[in-house]
Image (tube, rainbow, N blue to C red):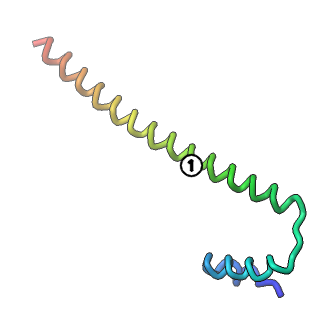
Amino acid sequence: MALTWKQLRDTEDAKLIALHDEVAASTSVGLNYYLEEIQRRQQERAIEASHKLAKTSFWLTVANTALALAAVVIALMSQQ
């Protein structure tokens, strides 16, 4: 018997994995099973790469801001 939507959403990951493993022993799968897993892994890698890019962009922005402030200070000091 399948879980209701609410039960499925409320079930902890470890329990879902255990339920999957129980059913997997007596279930045959098609190609979509493997294709969906490959797609999930690709998506996970893309999300990780995007997160890394965002962190790098943040730190480049911080460095750029610091350099811009230093340039302003130097410009003001050189005018005196």
Q: Quadrant of residue 11?
A: bottom right
Question: Quick check: 68 above or below 10?
Answer: above
Name the residue: 81% across, 59% down.
Answer: 34
Residue in the foreground of this view, choosing between 53 and 21: 21
**In the image, 29: left or right of 55?**
right
**In the image, 41: left or right of 4?**
left
Residue identified by numbered label 1: 48
Q: Residues within 10 Å of mark 1 (few under 14, many from 20)?
A: few
Name the residue: 28% across, 31% down.
Answer: 66
**In the image, 46: left or right of 33?**
left
Locate residue 62, reporting x and y percent.
34, 36
Amino acid type at circle 1 is Glu
How many numbered marks are there?
A: 1
Q: Quadrant of residue 31?
A: bottom right
**Residue most extreme to the left:** 80
Q: Quadrant of the N terminus?
A: bottom right
Question: Quick check: 4 above or below 36?
Answer: below
Name the residue: 51% across, 40% down.
Answer: 53
Name the residue: 79% across, 58% down.
Answer: 36
**Residue most extreme to the front:** 25
Instruction: Determine the secondary structure under disc 1.
Output: helix
**In the image, 19: left or right of 12?**
right
Question: Quick check: 26 above or below 59?
Answer: below
Locate residue 3, reporting x and y percent.
77, 84
Q: Quadrant of the C terminus?
A: top left
Locate residue 72, reporting x and y percent.
23, 22
Locate residue 23, reporting x and y percent.
80, 80
Q: Quadrant of residue 18?
A: bottom right
